Amino acid sequence: MKRPTMQDIAHRAGVTKAAVSFALNGRPGVSEATRRRILAIAEELGWQPSSAARALSDGRSGSFGLVIDRPARTLGLEPFFMQLISGIQAELARDTSPLLLTMAEDQTAEIALYRTWWARRLVDGVFLVDLQVDDARVPALEALGMPAVVIGAPVGTGGLPAVWSDEARAVETAVRHLTDLGHRRLARVAGPAHLRHTRIRTTAFEQVTAAMGLSGRTVEADYSGESGSAATRRLLAAPPAARPTAIVYDNDVMALSGLAAAQSLGLDVPGELSIVAWDDSALCELVRPSLTALSRDIAAHGAHAARLLRQAAGGEEVGNVQDPAPTLRLRGSTATPPSAR
């Protein structure tokens, strides 16, 4: 079934294509009765303006873009992005704005894609995720004049607005919970060190543990289950008197793998090792013990970013939006360590 055109509407209404254009665009040139008849026929046929035609008429496509630069094997397993995208799409669906989603192998390819999208008027703006410590995308987007919203802390974002929550405060929340239970040797399995939010969390973890007189160690991983398991095994290979009694993971997938690794080594969770996951998900409740996790409304986070980007693309002056910091959802994976009993 072919897509209905303005010519189809003109044929059905018995008018010229120019008359159809006048009616659909609310311009003078046809009577009110003819306008109503044309609009009724257009609705009956299911006609919608093409994005290309709309871009030529007002310079806007009505679409927004999201490029993700992560390995497909980790992206497909991590609930965070699925929830984030669902929140973005739910907000954009309110006015039927499409989301153009794709992946890039590196920042150079991502920037080239932005330039193509902008030159061809395929999107009105983009969401910027996984901001890096030295991120070439920010100056590139500013030079293009392309509306963009950063999903992450407003650090190193230039003049781009950001939707963010307080990562450092979340770290402190997790560490204080563990120290209140009596833990003194803590570790953290982090995401890639080149990501801005990883650096913020690492700095906060070092500062909080030092201020409390705790032993704190961070090891880098890549968000995958394999890396989370390997990092856990390295941490637990230390002699019992030196190994951590609690580990905080930067995502739920690594925490789940860390739990499995600890149990395979014969350690009781939480009797001998406490575990905290970042970004609560249904996965955290499906294991035994269920995982204590830092929880936030990720879908709402995505919706706020979509609303901000729509406003920016419409020419409005927008600023940073701060969402509530994650809160700790207590479950069965944290308890008092043996040394504090």
Image: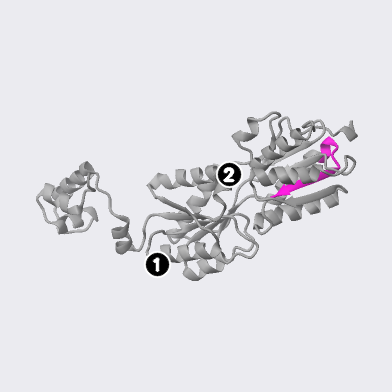
Q: How far from the left and from the top, in percent, is residue 34?
A: 14, 49
Q: How far from the left and from the top, in percent, is residue 119?
A: 40, 67
The disc, 2 or 1, on the residue closer to the chain's N-terminal end is: 2
Instruction: Tell me the element at label 1.
Output: helix
* 213 magenta-colored: no
Q: How is the image coloured?
A: one colour
Q: How far from the left and from the top, in percent, is residue 101?
A: 46, 52
Could you tell me which residue is drawn at 80 percent across and 36 percent down? 273
Q: Could you tell whether 36 is left or right of 144 in the image?
A: left
Q: Amino acid at mark 1?
A: Ala
Q: Residues within 10 Å of mark 1 (few under 14, many from 20)?
A: few
C-alpha gap between disc 2 and disc 1: 31 Å
Where residue 121 sits, quadrant-wise, is bottom left
Q: In the rendered image, which residue does mark 1 sit on?
A: 119
Q: Give the residues drawn in magenta, as a range.
A: 179-190
Above-or-below relation of 173 to 5: above
Q: In the rendered image, which residue does mark 2 sit on?
A: 80
